[in-house]
Image (tube, rainbow, N blue to C red):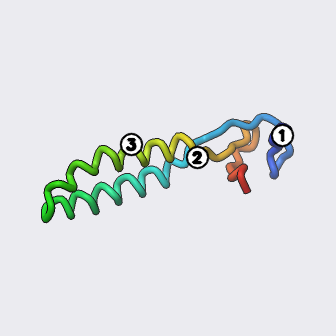
């Protein structure tokens, strides 16, 4: 079953990433783990794991966007 835009009814739908959540989570976690890394230096090894996890979340959880009216929505709801 093809997706339809809830606003205009078009079938020209493309997946787009959740860029703002990617930036908030990746930068926020980097600051938190980086600050904690000054007290416990072993936590610095968690930063690359955190970055890869945030990147995988960004890639696997796309929103849908209509090519005609540029309306974005979550197709899983």
Image point (83%, 37%), residue name: 2
Q: Earlier in the sequence, mark 3 or mark 2?
A: 3
Q: CA distance from mark 2 to mark 1?
A: 22 Å
As drawn, the label of residue 52 is 3
Mark seen at residue 61: 2
Question: Would residue 66 appear left or right of 20 to someone viewing this image?
Answer: right
Give the CA separation, mark 3 to mark 2.
14 Å
Q: Is 55 drawn above or below residue 38 in the view shown?
A: above
x, y percent for residue 48:
30, 44
Query: Going by the image, does 16 lie left or right of 33?
Result: right
Nearest the eye: 19 or 42? 42
Task: Give the residue at the far front of this rendering.
Answer: 42
Placement of the C terminus among the 4 image quadrants: bottom right
Provide residue 30's location: percent of width, then percent of height.
Answer: 30, 55
| Residue 63 image position (x, y, % from top left) | 64, 47
Q: At 27% across and 51% down in the image, what residue appears?
A: 46
Who's the residue at 61% across and 44% down the image? 62
Residue 37 x/y as whole percent: 18, 59
């Amino acid at each position: 079953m093809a997706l339809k835009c809830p606003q205009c009814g078009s079938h020209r739908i493309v997946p787009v990433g959740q860029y703002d959540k990617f930036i908030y989570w990746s930068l926020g976690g980097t600051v938190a783990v980086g600050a904690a890394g000054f007290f416990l230096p072993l936590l610095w090894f968690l930063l690359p794991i955190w970055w890869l996890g945030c990147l995988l979340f960004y890639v696997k959880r796309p929103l849908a966007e209509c090519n005609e009216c540029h309306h974005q929505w979550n197709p899983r709801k």
